Amino acid sequence: MTPVLRNRLIGVAIAFAIYAADQLTKWWVDGPLGLEVPGDKLDLLPFFDFYRVHNYGVSLGMFEATSPETRWALVGVTGLIALLVTVWMFREKLFGDILGLSLILGGALGNIKDRYELGYVLDFADFHIGEFRPFLIFNIADAAITIGVVIILARAFFMRDKDVDDMMDGKPADAAESNT
């Protein structure tokens, strides 16, 4: 098995692990923890609670689906985005890029399933400092998507083309520069 194929298969495994963890935690919140209706709350730590919220929109609650048509439009658009991320992931060769894309894909699949089956995304993780909430209430899928985007952006801004070329040749960047 080539290193590139191995990286891509690991990416698929990570995407499915994120999807499974997201669905398991949502089941746990909805079932055994008994947070059944929006507003149900479970205090866990002085700075972290489970607080059930139904998110009918996308990131930051924007583009809220207020009708069946907008709900299915969101399912379609997010499904298309997930498909594009999958194609992108299978075109990448470096594990760092595949990792970021696999986190985005796994999170997207978890939220798409919610929106398809429920008409909303179940959010529950509430990080706060007193009454200050630096984040909106989120779930595992949202966290994975955010981390994946940060990885992709960091790699885009901080990886030089020469570093990537040297990694593809199997040489560390420092060794390649000292040979020139």
Image (cartoon, rainbow, N blue to C red):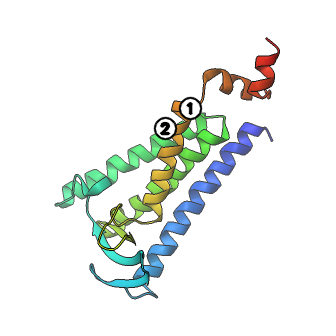
- Percent from the top left, x then y, of residue 62? 24, 53
* Residue receiving disc 2: 153
Q: Amino acid at mark 1?
A: Phe
- Percent from the top left, x then y, of residue 13? 64, 56
- Percent from the top left, x then y, of residue 109? 46, 57
**Identity of the residue furthest to the top in this view:** 180
Q: Is residue 93 above or below residue 149?
A: above
Q: Quadrant of residue 92?
A: top right
Q: Nearer the viewer, residue 92 or 113?
A: 92
Q: Quadrant of residue 126?
A: bottom left
Callout 2 touching callout 1 (CB < 8 Å): no
Residue at (31%, 84%) from the top-left corner?
40
Please state the total of marks drawn on the protein image.
Answer: 2
Foreground: disc 2 or disc 1: 1
Please tell me which of labels 2 and 1 falls first in the chain. Answer: 2
* Residue receiving disc 1: 158
- Rendered-image quadrant of the N terminus: top right
User: What element does badge 2 sit on?
Assistant: helix
